[in-house]
């Protein structure tokens, strides 16, 4: 079993995809671990799973192969009698899919022992070829062909990463830096704990990586843990942003050829949710229809072709056709990066940064003269602490921006950094009352000292200069949104009927304050709490004790006890456990309303008022889904009003609503109310009401007639067109009679 | 379609802008209203010795700019213009010498033009000829008229404000009766929630607020005593700044808790001080009558035709051949990590806040004493220490429910006032959003080539010649301005729109003049003879144009073999191909390409192979 390795390189460069081979050690030792430590194999599996999840759900075109080494069985193209044994090509290069995600979980079964690295590709073309090796280095290897491997890797432009359960510089870690390095995030490995094989393995890794890239090679050796936290693999294979070639101009005769790249921009979830029918789960079954109608009594429908585009200009509505608009609109001269002037860096406020991106501007590729010219500008600005204010336009069609180009000088590169700045129209001048000059708020020396000790205990940066260590670097944390979404999608794909899993603990843990800081700041926080009395204002305070209130409430009103308890329990779990509801929001207004009513922290009338203004707002959108929300709000309103025996607000609201149906064009909505028979609260239901039962019935009556006429089609499931048209026709009738 | 898109685009915006309007405070769900009450008596028309403008001219220019900015930024606000001290009168009572020039309504093009006509020397003459001046007015009556204007409005008003422009500090010095009446009317107004602001204009000998107006105007608890101490606005821009600071009612986007640690939470309001103003969305009009049409949208079942309620639908995403279905609530749940709020992680020195870590415009927080008493004091202490020690607070920030958290730097800002004690920057923390690892892209940067000292020095001279004092409010958005000028022209039947000055264009001529020979000196230092950065660029362009042409020919060659397509169909991975490739594949297989939507193409191909 003499381990030998040879890398074969195929293919040349195409622009679109990467090929990644994941090389996973399934050797026996990978399953061993110190108590309380996850076995290396489990850790590696997690990293791989996370990686594959990302690949699948991000739908990129990268192809993945999974090669296991240290396996019982042998399956690979190079295998001959004694060579390339115990290497199992689990999966050839292809697009990752759910099968692969599933398989990673079966891998547990494949555990035996063996060695090194192997590679396989198809005759396709890839932008990047990349191998990621996950191993604990416990398997023996022979170094006889190491040079050939390295040579081939170089020739083929293959990038390589190692993922180990322990850090590469394990010896220095354990000896030199002491406590700082033994922070909670570092797994407790020491040189002593490593076997001879592992030590030799480390040497091998070092050798390979440094010979591939003298300076930065060792940066590509990661621990399992940090790779989960820092997305190391993704960074390595991610596609490079598009270049934006342009010319920087200063005045009419000084031009520098530049190229810009988006350097920082919010990475968003790419796929959107499609609406599907709940029963058939087909999106084809859900159709949307939009019609235009005049704002007259009959809501006369007009064909789309008979409508034109217009704009509001204050109180005026100005017809403005697309053609005219196109002709008259602001026209820019096309892409540009023109300096308008230079100003002090201090004059550009950080909180005035606009837009959603930062662009880094370099000199055009392979143009050393441009590089020198740009470098002069960068250094001049840097030394003078100034910035260039520039007009930036991406292309002819895009709106011009005014922004600042800051000088940025790093060890490896220098560039200008462009950020958009606000236009006059973007600024809002709000006046806030003074804090530092207000006698009421000036803190005492003692109080300031308490804040100081809090700051001291919660500093996230330790040491200075080179030695500086940042305990919480946001820019190396992956956006938990993606991982959580992928986790849920993955789970639902494999278990269609199970509820979604809770977020993984490590994902949540990543977002928490570092443990050592939490430990340090406990005492200063206590002190702070003593020095600064904080009192939740009455309504909030009560809310905290809402649970207690429930008990009291039910005792006071024995007659409704049963019902209330049930309800309260429901809301206790659904809502209150989730914490703070302070106002009727727009997401679940009915729920907020019920919670607020139960909390009793606000007067009943006020909560109702919040609800009704929210309903009015929802109705303003004129959209069916908000209508449904509003219906449940009004239902809740009705129910709570009856319970509270306070029907005045509800009845008057409903009456006002009815009066305004015409004016506010709410016929559709009114119809829904009628359908659900949501009427006034009558005397019969609640004593205090001034509305008789008959009045309550009649309140909806006129609308019921047309509804009866058109109701049947809803059941008989007749012709589609028929139905839709009738739906349209209903409105004029209701509006005539209302 | 219009309303539909409006609605949807708004929803998109909510994503980016934290629910700009959607989360607006429920307490203020009416419309804002503002009355300009302008003194039109003789003294307002008198110019000082070295003043370019009379107080009256300044006032009207200022009001006009409020009109136009309201049209752009908040076209639902109601504005009115009332003159007092005129010879003529027009009001509902009617009182003499009070002229309601613009009733309380949203401003339109006509109104802007009206004000324009009173501008300058000519305008003033026109005003005096048509409306005239009179000293025999009563401020009480003017205020009465304002009060009527407010009460005559049908819609609900959330915020009512009167801005009084005058340069007489004691209008009823001779008539204590009138003065008394005015005071009591002002107090009535204040009691009904109307805010009375004084915009005092220059008066020879100085404007003394304490003589009369101290008892008239609202001293807002919230805005401190700034109003009282303010001197007269000498310049138009002073006045404009002052008016602008007051005309907009500030609104919290949300009220959240700022948690410092277990059990230590204070309440803060979140404000948006900068946000991108955009062109408004179009509305649909009926061709015949130019009236606005309504849009109705329904969801219905394709087969049964029955109306679908939200509960009848679910959400789905398709990966490969697999469709994953979630309840609508679940799609929200997936995004939920924390309750809305700010959670302190720790502190870092300000220099650790990287300039290039920018994602979106900042928010601003200010304490909310009404929710947690003691918030302001703790907030102030934090603010003071953060300023003093030059640190920022790192927080985990969940702006709304069901929003995944982001980390943000809270950067302290102290209060700053100008010489008239108008606030230039408010006290509080800016909330700077920080990028996650995913948001930072790795770049292949070119090798570093550094310039030599003499080259840098020459550039420094150039930089020095072109220095100016940047001010954030100095640039108008030419796209928006042009759009509104166009609308204005159409609304008023002007022959052509008023020209806008595009401030974003470089003043190349002036720059060249200032630089003189520096440019050629610099070029000599960095560019070899014959090097033409423009020419080369153009050349490159042409080249890429050529190869682009080649590429266009090449593209069809990049077809996907049928086998591979079949495999894609089988695995449901067609989605990974690009639209042009899919189109090409359809053509190849002799299928008619009907749509351009990716899903349509995929469906067509899938249907073909599954046949």
Image: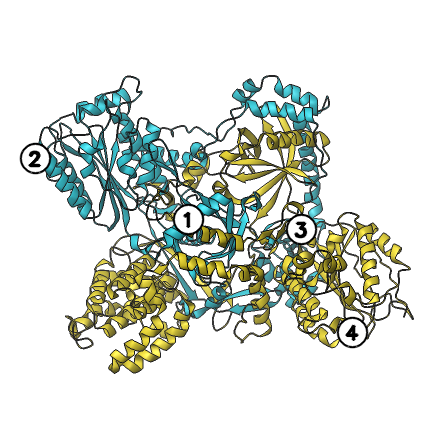
Chain colours: A yellow, B cyan
Residue hosting label 4: A28
The reply to whether residue A731 is in sight is: no
> Do the residues indicated by labels 4 and 1 lie within the same chain of the protein?
yes
Q: Is residue A423 above or below residue A555?
A: above
What whole-number distance in Å separates the C-alpha atoms at marks 1 and 3? 54 Å
Q: Position of residue A518 (x, y in %)?
A: 54, 61
Q: CA distance from mark 4 to mark 1?
A: 63 Å
Residue, far front: A446
Viewer-proximal residue, B256 or B581?
B256
User: Pointers 2 and 1 in contact (CB under 8 A)?
Assistant: no
Q: Earlier in the sequence, mark 3 or mark 4?
A: 4
Q: Secondary structure at mark 3?
A: loop
Q: Which residue is mark 2?
A: B177
Give the numbered dot on residue A445: 1
Asked if residue A322 lies left or right of residue A140, the reply is left
Q: Which residue is mark 3?
A: A239
Name the image quarter holding residue A164: bottom right
Q: Are marks 2 and 4 on the same chain?
A: no
Image quadrant holding the C terminus of chain A, namely bottom left
Disc 4 and disc 1 in contact, CB within 8 angstroms: no
Looking at marks 1 and 3 on the same chain, the residue that comes earlier in the sequence is marked by: 3
Dot 3 and dot 2 within a common chain? no
């Amino acid at each position: 079993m003499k381990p030998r390795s040879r890398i074969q390189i195929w293919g040349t460069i195409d622009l679109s995809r990467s090929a990644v081979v994941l090389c996973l050690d399934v050797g026996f030792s990978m399953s061993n671990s110190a108590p309380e430590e996850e076995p290396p194999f489990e850790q590696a599996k997690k990293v791989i799973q996370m990686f594959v999840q990302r690949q699948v759900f991000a739908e990129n075109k990268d192809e993945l192969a999974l090669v296991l080494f240290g396996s019982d069985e042998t399956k690979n193209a190079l295998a001959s009698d004694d060579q390339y044994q115990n290497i199992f090509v689990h999966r050839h290069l292809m697009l990752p899919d759910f099968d692969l995600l599933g398989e990673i979980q079966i891998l547990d079964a494949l555990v035996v022992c063996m060695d090194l690295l192997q590679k396989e590709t198809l005759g396709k073309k890839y932008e990047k070829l990349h191998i990621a090796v996950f191993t604990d280095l416990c398997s023996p290897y022979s170094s006889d062909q190491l040079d050939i491997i390295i040579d081939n890797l170089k020739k083929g432009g293959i990038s390589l990463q190692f993922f180990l359960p322990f850090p590469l510089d394990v010896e220095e870690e354990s000896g030199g830096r002491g406590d700082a390095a033994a922070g909670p995030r570092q797994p407790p490995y020491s040189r002593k704990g490593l076997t001879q094989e592992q030590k030799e393995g480390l040497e091998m890794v070092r050798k390979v990586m440094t010979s591939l890239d003298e300076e930065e090679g060792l940066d590509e050796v990661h621990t399992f843990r940090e790779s989960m936290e820092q997305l190391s693999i993704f960074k390595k294979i991610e596609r490079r942003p598009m270049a934006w070639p342009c010319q920087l101009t200063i005045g009419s005769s000084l031009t520098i050829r530049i190229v810009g790249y988006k350097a920082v921009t919010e990475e968003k979830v790419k796929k959107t949710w499609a609406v599907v029918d709940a029963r058939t789960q087909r999106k084809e079954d859900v159709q949307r229809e939009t019609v235009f109608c005049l704002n007259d009594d009959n809501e006369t429908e007009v064909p789309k072709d008979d409508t034109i585009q217009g704009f509001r200009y204050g109180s005026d509505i100005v017809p403005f056709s697309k053609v005219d608009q196109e002709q008259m609109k602001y026209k820019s001269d096309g892409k540009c990066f023109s300096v308008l002037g230079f100003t002090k860096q201090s004059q550009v406020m950080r909180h005035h940064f606009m837009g959603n991106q930062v662009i880094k501007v370099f000199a055009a590729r392979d143009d050393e003269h441009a590089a020198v010219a740009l470098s002069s500008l960068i250094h001049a600005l840097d030394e003078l602490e100034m910035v260039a204010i520039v007009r930036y336009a991406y292309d002819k069609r895009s709106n011009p921006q005014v922004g600042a180009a800051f000088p940025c000088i790093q060890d490896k590169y220098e560039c200008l950094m462009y950020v958009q700045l606000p236009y006059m129209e973007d600024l809002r001048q709000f006046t806030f009352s003074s804090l530092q000059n207000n006698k009421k708020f000036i803190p005492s020396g003692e109080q300031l000292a308490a804040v100081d000790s809090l700051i001291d205990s919660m500093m996230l940066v330790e040491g200075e200069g080179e030695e500086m260590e940042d305990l919480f670097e946001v820019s190396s944390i992956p956006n938990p949104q993606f991982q959580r979404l992928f986790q849920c999608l993955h789970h639902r794909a494999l278990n269609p009927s199970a509820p979604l899993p809770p977020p993984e603990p490590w994902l949540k843990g990543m977002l928490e304050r570092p443990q050592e800081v939490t430990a340090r700041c406990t005492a200063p926080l206590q002190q702070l709490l003593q020095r600064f009395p904080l009192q939740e204002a009455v309504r909030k305070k009560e809310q905290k004790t809402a649970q207690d209130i429930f008990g009291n409430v039910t005792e006071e009103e024995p007659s409704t006890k049963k019902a209330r308890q049930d309800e309260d329990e429901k809301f206790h779990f659904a809502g209150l456990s989730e914490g703070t509801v302070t106002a009727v929001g727009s997401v679940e207004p009915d729920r907020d309303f019920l919670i607020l009513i139960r909390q009793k922290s606000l007067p009943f009338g006020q909560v109702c008022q919040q609800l009704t203004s929210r309903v009015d707002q929802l109705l303003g959108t004129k959209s069916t889904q908000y209508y449904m929300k509003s219906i449940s709000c009004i239902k809740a309103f009705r129910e709570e009003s009856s319970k509270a025996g306070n029907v005045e607000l509800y009845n008057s609201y409903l009456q006002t609503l009815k009066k305004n149906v015409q004016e506010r064009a709410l016929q559709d909505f009114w119809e829904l109310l009628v359908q659900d028979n949501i009427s006034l609260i009558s005397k019969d239901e609640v004593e205090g009401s001034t509305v008789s039962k008959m009045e309550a019935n009649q309140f909806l009556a006129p609308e019921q007639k047309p509804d009866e006429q058109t109701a049947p089609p809803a059941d008989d499931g007749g012709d589609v067109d028929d139905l839709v048209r009738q739906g349209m026709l209903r409105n004029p009738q209701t509006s005539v009679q209302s | 379609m219009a309303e539909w898109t409006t609605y949807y685009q708004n929803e998109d915006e909510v994503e980016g802008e934290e629910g700009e309007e959607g989360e607006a405070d429920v307490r203020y769900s009416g419309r804002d209203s503002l009355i300009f009450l302008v003194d039109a008596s003789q003294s307002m028309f008198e110019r000082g010795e070295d003043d370019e403008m009379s107080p009256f001219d300044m006032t009207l220019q200022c009001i006009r700019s409020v009109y136009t900015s309201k049209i752009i930024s908040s076209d639902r606000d109601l504005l009115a213009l009332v003159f007092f001290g005129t010879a003529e009168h027009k009001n509902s009572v009617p009182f003499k010498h009070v002229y309601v020039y613009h009733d309380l309504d949203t401003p339109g093009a006509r109104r802007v033009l009206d004000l324009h006509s009173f501008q300058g020397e000519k305008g003033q003459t026109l005003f005096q000829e048509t409306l005239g001046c009179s000293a025999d007015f009563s401020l009480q009556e003017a205020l009465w008229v304002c009060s009527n204007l407010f009460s005559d409005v049908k819609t609900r008003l959330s915020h009512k404000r009167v801005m009084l422009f005058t340069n007489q500090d004691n209008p009823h010095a001779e008539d204590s009766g009138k003065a008394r009446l005015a005071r009591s009317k002002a107090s009535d107004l204040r009691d009904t929630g109307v805010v009375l602001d004084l915009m005092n204009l220059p008066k020879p000998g100085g404007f003394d607020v304490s003589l009369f107006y101290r008892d008239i105007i609202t001293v807002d608890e919230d805005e401190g005593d700034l109003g009282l101490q303010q001197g007269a606005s000498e310049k138009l821009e002073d006045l404009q700044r002052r008016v602008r600071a007051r005309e907009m009612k500030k609104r919290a986007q949300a009220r959240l808790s700022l948690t410092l640690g277990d059990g230590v939470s204070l309440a803060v309001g979140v404000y948006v001080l900068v946000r991108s103003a955009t062109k408004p969305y179009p509305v649909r009009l009926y061709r015949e009558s130019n009236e606005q049409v309504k849009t109705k949208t329904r969801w219905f079942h394709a087969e049964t035709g029955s109306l679908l309620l939200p509960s009848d639908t679910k959400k789905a995403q398709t990966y490969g051949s697999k469709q994953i279905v979630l309840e609508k609530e679940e799609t929200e749940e997936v995004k939920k990590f924390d309750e809305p709020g700010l959670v302190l992680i720790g502190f870092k020195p300000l220099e650790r806040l990287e300039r290039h870590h920018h994602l979106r415009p900042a928010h601003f927080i200010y304490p909310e004493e009404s929710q947690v008493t003691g918030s302001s004091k703790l907030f102030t202490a934090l603010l003071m220490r953060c300023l003093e020690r030059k640190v920022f607070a790192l927080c985990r920030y969940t702006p709304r429910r069901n929003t995944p958290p982001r980390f943000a730097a809270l950067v302290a800002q102290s209060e700053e006032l100008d010489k008239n004690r108008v606030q230039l920057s408010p006290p509080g923390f800016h909330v700077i959003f920080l990028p996650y690892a995913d948001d930072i892209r790795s770049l292949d940067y070119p090798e570093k080539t550094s310039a030599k000292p003499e080259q840098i020095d020459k550039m420094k001279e150039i930089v020095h010649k072109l220095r100016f004092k940047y001010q954030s409010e100095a640039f108008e958005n030419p796209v928006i301005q042009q759009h509104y000028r166009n609308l204005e022209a159409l609304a008023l039947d002007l022959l052509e729109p008023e020209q806008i000055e595009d401030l974003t264009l470089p003043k190349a001529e002036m720059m060249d003049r200032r630089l003189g020979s520096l440019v050629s000196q610099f070029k000599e230092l960095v560019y070899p003879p014959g090097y033409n950065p423009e020419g080369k660029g153009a050349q490159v362009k042409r080249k890429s144009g050529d190869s682009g042409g080649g590429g266009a020919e090449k593209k069809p060659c990049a077809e996907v073999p049928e086998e591979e397509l079949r495999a894609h169909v089988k695995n449901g991975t067609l989605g990974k191909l690009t639209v042009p490739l899919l189109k090409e594949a359809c053509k190849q297989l002799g299928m008619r390409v009907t749509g351009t939507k990716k899903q349509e193409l995929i469906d067509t191909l899938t249907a073909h192979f599954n046949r």
